[in-house]
Image (cartoon, grey):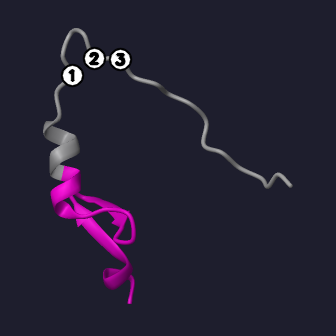
Amino acid sequence: AACRLYLEYQGLLFPRETHSAESLKFAQEFTLKDDDVLAVTYPKSGQFS
């Protein structure tokens, strides 16, 4: 059952719900350029009314 929920990629397990072999390969091969800008934030949590 766990093999259906998780994808093994280079010895690590990733949830299939959010990852594929193609997306992990793309992330691994991605290169930044000198003028690229990264916006890094905490994920939103909680609920606002």
Q: For mark 1, what is the residue?
A: 32
Using the image, determine if residue 39 lies above or below residue 15: above
Label 2 near label 3: C-beta < 8 Å?
yes
Disc 2 marks which amino acid? Asp
Label 2 near label 1: C-beta < 8 Å?
yes
Q: Position of residue 23 (x, y in %)?
A: 22, 55
Q: Measuring 34% from the left and 63% from the top, which residue is drawn there?
A: 13
The numbered mark, 1 or 3, whose residue comes first in the sequence reads: 1
Rendered image: mark on residue 23: none
Which residue, as the protein is rendered here, is positioned at the far top? 34
Q: For mark 2, what is the residue?
A: 36
Q: Which residues are magenta?
A: 1-24
Which residue, as the protein is rendered here, is positioned at the far right? 49
Q: Is residue 18 left or right of residue 45?
A: left
Residue 27 magenta: no
Q: Measuring 60% from the left and 43% from the top, which residue is drawn there?
A: 43
Circle 3 sits in a helix, a strand or a loop, which is it? loop
Q: CA distance from mark 3 to mark 2?
A: 4 Å
Of discs 1 and 3, which sits in the foreground?
3
**Pointer 1: residues within 10 angstroms few (<14), some, or many (20+)?**
few
**Pointer 2: residues within 10 angstroms few (<14), some, or many (20+)?**
few
Q: Measuring 28% from the left and 17% from the top, which residue is drawn there?
A: 36
**Residue situated in front as seen by the camera: 35 or 27:** 35
Q: CA distance from mark 1 to mark 2?
A: 6 Å
